[in-house]
Image (cartoon, coloured by chain):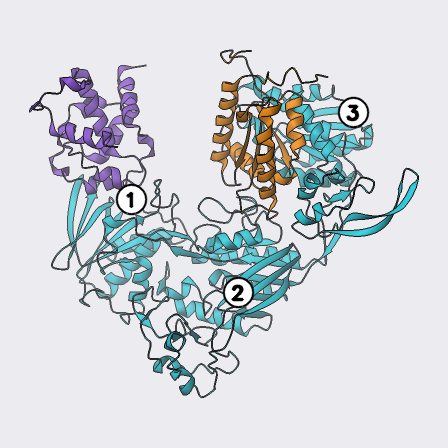
Amino acid sequence: MSEKKKQAELIEEISGVNPLKCMKCGKCSATCPSYNEMDIKPHQFVSYVINEDVESLVNSESLWKCLSCFACVERCPRDVKPGKLIDAARQMVVRQRGQAYLSPDEIPELLDPELPQQLLVSAFRRYRR
Amino acid sequence: MQRIGVFVCHCGSNIAATVDVSKVAEMALMEPGVVHAEDYQYMCSEAGQAKIQDAIHEKKLSGIVVCSCSPRMHEATFRKAAERAGLNPYMVEIANIREHCSWIHKDMEEATKKAVILMRAAVAKVNLNTPLKPGESRVTKRALIIGGGIAGIQTALDIADAGYEVDIVEKTPSIGGRMSQLDKTFPTLDCSACILTPKMVEASAHEKIKIYTYSEVEKVSGFVGDFTVDIRKKARSVDMDKCTGCGVCQEKCPSKKAPSEFNRGLNNRSAIYTPFAQAIPNVPVIDREACIKFKTGKCGICSKVCQAGAIDYEQKDEIITEKYGAIVVATGFDTINLDKYDEYAYSQSKDVITSLELERVMNAAGPTHGHLERLSDGKAPKEMVFIQCVGSRCSDDRGKPYCSKICCMYTAKHAMLIRDKYPDVNVTVFYIDVRTPGKNFDEFYRRAVEQYGVNYIKGQVGKVIPQPDGKLLVQGSDLLDNKQILKEADMVVLATAIEPNPDVRKIATMLTASIDTNNFLTEAHAKLRPVESPTAGIFLSGVCQGPKDIPETVAQAGAAAVKAIGLLAKDKLLTNPCTAHSDELLCNGCSTCENVCPYGAITYEDKEVNDHGIREVRRLAVVNSALCQGCGACTVACPSGAMDLQGFSNRQIIAEVDAICR
Amino acid sequence: MSIENKSFRPKIVAFCCNWCSYAGADLAGSSRLSYPADVKIIRVPCSCRVNPMFILRAFEKGADGVIMCGCHPGDCHYSTGNYYARRRMTLLFSMLDYIGVENGRTRVEWVSAAEGVKFSDTMNSFVEKIHSLGENVRLGDLRCRN
């Protein structure tokens, strides 16, 4: 399996999303509050994963512009949830950086100010239940 | 010992590509009783059937196994072929090696093995088959139509024109259905009422058609050709024979706060009301929940003003029992509830409306007398936004997974009508796909764009935000321009998904007609029997079977009528001979079977039996084979094992089990 | 034979009512939704035609699993047949363990004529379950082989 395909499958695995379910309605982009900040728009995330071009997604501005507000996740009519895809891409980057694991006693009193805010918010959302 | 012939069908490559058909035929010859086996390209073709018939003659076959597609597909075909060759049709069994084997397995060896086992099971069963003779049952030459919308009316007219009696049962006070609520119809822009009311009048005036409005089907029993139906005529509180339809009672009624169902709750009606001016019958109904007389006992104005003395506060629900040969379901649709779609602000703003509500707004008899105005402040809108696919094509739990089919066209119609009547109003349509298959449909949509300047934007709306100044901020995306759009609108119209009338589930249960996960009634065959339910004698008309526009509904209504006429035209029906029967020597007259029989087909008789030389009179179960539908409940309930089912006998099923587990 | 043995091909008998589940199986077929070939379907008019004896007979003859499918409760073609079936099977299944058939080897599922996907999913999960249970050896001693 090519590296590109592996990456795309990893995204699907982390996010638990099947990008093929997308019907290209654009409701995610319609509802995204940071749409104008993004270079790759939410409705395009899906095609990047389908076309196995995770690299562009990982290197995009959008990766860190997404607020993890989950509006697209809530409103997506097809259960595709582009917010989860981008969240998965972020996780992939963080895992590669080797910051993936944290034991409780490693948590500093003050969290690393360099750590992207979105990551924290999305982690809280993801693990709140 | 039977002499069995096994015929293995290739079904082109449908079976032969995954099942080694010649191997199956070869293996068949090793089964007990099998004296002939062959495979052929298309067993259901005339040549294939001829092969079966030739073999019956030449090899003196007493039983047939056809390894082919599902028995639901061609069992009848092969039984008829066998009958023409002089064999009892019930000596034919089908091994389903297409739907249950070749189509679902990829590995040839595995599929062939399974096909052989399925063939063995069928051979084992045929070995125990006995010739059966169907009985006869009579046909009541009268049809029942459930639902008085355009589908029901059209079916009723077609059946009645063929000379049969038809009853229409309609839940609301008037026939007419959804079509009566529409203003104009696509793609010709005919006025809906102008083309519907003549049909309503024709139906009500037809000597063969009887209409029960404000009535519901309460209970259905019986079977094809001989249904017995209880119809509840709800208390109208108005004597239908005396009422002249003058309308004075409605004018004088002091209680005018009940939301009008006909106008989708956009305005109010009186407690005594007819849903709309052209209602048929033109006899009002008292809504007892809203009526002051019924709530407090004081009022009675309608009774005082009625010169005909038609008001009857004492009237009670009445149950009518009728017999029918055929039943047509035409229960239609409603729009889905939008509570789960709060992003479109439907419940927050009066100016966000559904398309069906817009129909009422644009109709001269509607709440705004046909003027396009905002329902919040009555101002004329300048910017209108239409949102497509609200609740349609959703795979989440909020909406429906199917395309509602009619929305693209009615939105083009609305947009066109608005641009025509109010050229200064800008109309924007947010769409995902524009789907306009149908005669003159795409041309119609293109006219909306090219001639009327309707602005179509590819992209869904994410959110509608009501502004303090009463405007609506629509946040959508334009996928082709790759832009996010913020647009101020005065009115927003939602193309709300349609769903089968919620009552259909109850009706389907009464009729034992099958229904799918979206509550659409299932047809007997998706392509070849689209207007029949798998339950014999039940026919489907209109949206209860799947989303449809008016021309399709009318066409399907006619098709359902033809099928019903085909049934009513028969004097006698052959009944299913696969019925239960009891073994007189084993039966001990305990009544267990009588209690489980859903058809009341089992009675008890005192009969003299000869039990190994002992002659005595015993109380024995007797099955009325005209009533028995062959479910087999009694066969399992019988504690002494006296009951058995012909065609699916204990020994036959056990033989199948054994063959599979061998 | 152990669970790890890949060559284990269970014998599975499926009783399907003519009106819903058999049609559901047909739909699974025409939609090309695959499930293991170990499942063999027997058509019965209604789930209430399934005599508990048939299920015992299947196990006696070496079946590793038996599944019965009928119309959804309330949707029975014969109005009430599946209610009888449900009660009978509840009673039978409660006693099967005693005679040497584990609980997981029997199952009742409601599959309508429109649920081809559900039919294939059900069969896939049932076969998986039988694979995890392995061959029906507990009954083996009692089984009379002919």
Of the pair B358 and B559, the residue shown nearer to us? B358
Which chain does tag 3 point to?
B
Q: In the displayed structure, would residue C87 be above or below residue C139? A: below
Q: Residues within 10 Å of mark 3 (few under 14, many from 20)?
A: many
| Shade representing chain C | orange
Indicate the quadrant containing the N terminus of chain B: top left, top right, bottom left or bottom right: top right
Residue found at x 69% / y 59% = B139
Instruction: First in sequence, mark 1 or 2: give its number.
Output: 2
Q: In the displayed structure, would residue B372 be above or below residue C98? A: below
**Residue beneath disc 3:** B33
Q: Quadrant of residue B579?
A: top right
Indicate the quadrant containing the C terminus of chain B: top left, top right, bottom left or bottom right: top right
| Shade representing chain B | cyan
Label 3 sits on a secondary structure element that is loop
Say left or right for B238 vs B391: right
Q: Position of residue B336 (x, y in %)?
A: 36, 53
Say left or right for B473 vs B509: left
Of the pair B42 and C68, the residue shown nearer to us? C68
Visible in this render: residue B181?
yes
**Residue beneath disc 2:** B169
Mark on residue B323? Answer: none
Residue found at x 72% / y 43% = B578
Q: In the displayed structure, would residue C13 be above or below residue B352? A: above
Identified by mark 2, the residue type is Val
Mark on residue B432? Answer: 1
Of the pair B501 and B368, the residue shown nearer to us? B501
Q: Chain letter for purple?
A: A
Instruction: Answer yes or no: are tags 1 and 2 on the same subunit.
Output: yes
